[in-house]
Amino acid sequence: MYILSGPGIVNDLRTFPDIASIMVTWQRPSENVGGAFVTGYEVTHQLFVPEANPIRQTYVNGSANTSHIVSNLLPRQAYQIIVRALVAGIGGEPLQVIRSTLEIGGA
């Protein structure tokens, strides 16, 4: 009996902030765990503040798509962004970054 396991962790997670969005890029996991091939990615984000905030999820289909623009964000706010590789709906280890959007009228 073969049990499908999740993929490895994504590599080289980078962010490029703007006023109301943050572009996120990453590299495919370097390991092919249990013969599992990446079928897509899950990108989640939420405001990074002590109060509870809703988590927003986006699914990026296809193993070749290794970027996503998180949009409709507030200026000058820190966001927690998490990226996980997926194999048939099974998520790999998450990789996270905290990044702030830019101020209106400045960089």
Image (cartoon, helix red, strand yellow):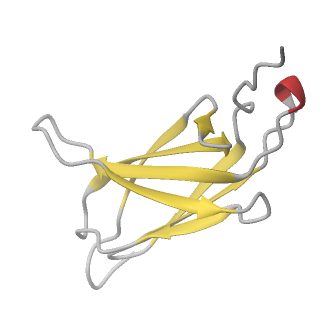
Q: Quadrant of the N terminus?
A: top right
**Residue depicted at 50% across the width and 71% down the height:** 69
Residue 40 lies in what quarter of the image? bottom right
Residue furthest toward the top? Answer: 1
Which residue is at 59% across, 35% downward? 91
From what the image shows, is residue 104 above or below residue 35? below
Percent x, y for residue 82? 48, 43
Looking at the rendered structure, the number of numbered marks drawn on it comes to 0
Q: Residue furthest bottom?
A: 105
Q: Residue at x 13, y 38 (%)?
A: 52
The spot of residue 103 in percent (x, y) is 28, 73
Q: In the image, 59: left or right of 3?
A: left
Residue at figure coordinates x 61%, y 28% from the top left? 93
Relative image position of residue 55 (x, y in whole percent): 28, 48
Name the image quarter holding residue 80. Answer: top left
Q: Is residue 104 above or below residue 69?
A: below
The single residue placed furthest to the left in the displayed view is 51
- Using residue 23 as the reference point, say whether residue 78 is left or right of it: left
Q: Nearer the viewer, residue 78 or 91?
A: 91
- Quarter holding the C terminus is bottom left
x, y percentage for residue 57? Answer: 39, 54
